[in-house]
Image: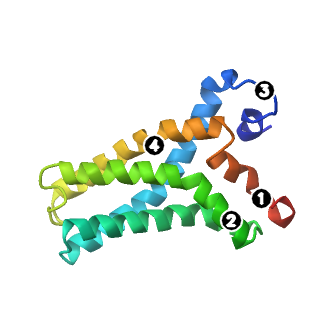
Amino acid sequence: MSAIEHAHQPGESSAPHAGGSLNRLAFSATAHCLTGCAIGEVLGMVIGTAVGLANGATVAISVLLAFVFGYSLTSLPLLRSGLALSAVVPLALASDTISIAIMEIVDNTLMLLIPGAIDASLDELLFWGSLALSLLVAGAAAFPANRWLIARGRGHAVVHGRHGAGPAGA
């Protein structure tokens, strides 16, 4: 029985899941979400910085790309498993929106609060160090939300239950 199946047996108390398997699953979901966020965030920050966009525009493009890449990393395996796009879109939105939103709020807030970080050039350690730190803190901030959602059969728990399900499982 998988961690998801075990974590969501009907009528079963959630108390046994306060430990290992739920934490591992939440960490995996957070790392998955953080990967998509990081790709979009780094790309957005690099584009905004390279072309000299204002801070607000740089943040906006970073947030947009973080959501695009975050949703894409969830959607592609589901589409490959045979699920229709009409089934995949609501799953991706339901599983990733809260996590990505938390990560983007934390990440971009830190980038704006660290003195000089968002204005640093691409060849400066301040830019890359601040971005790496802000993404790590953002992931840590999203972990409790992912854990809470998974413990209730929501968030990435729903998506993991669909992987490999194919059209019949939709």
Name the foreground residue: 119 vs 20. Answer: 119
Up-down: is 22 above or below 128? above
Residue under the point 76% across and 34% down:
6
- Relative vertical location of residue 134 with respect to residue 88 in this rendering, above or below: above
**Which residue bears the numbered disc 4?**
142
At x 69%, y 22%, the residue is 16
Indicate the amino acid at tag 1. Answer: Gly
| Residue of label 1 | 164
**Nearest to N terminus: mark 3 or mark 1:** 3
Instruction: Say which quarter of the image contains residue 9.
Output: top right
Q: Quadrant of the C terminus?
A: bottom right
Task: Give coordinates of residue 164: x percent, y percent.
Answer: 77, 59
Identify the disc placed on residue 1.
none
Q: Earlier in the sequence, mark 2 or mark 1?
A: 2
Q: Is residue 28 left or right of residue 78?
A: left
Q: Residues within 10 Å of mark 1 (few under 14, many from 20)?
A: some
Give the mark nearest the N terminus, 1 or 4: 4
Disc 1 vs disc 4: Cβ atoms closer than 8 Å?
A: no
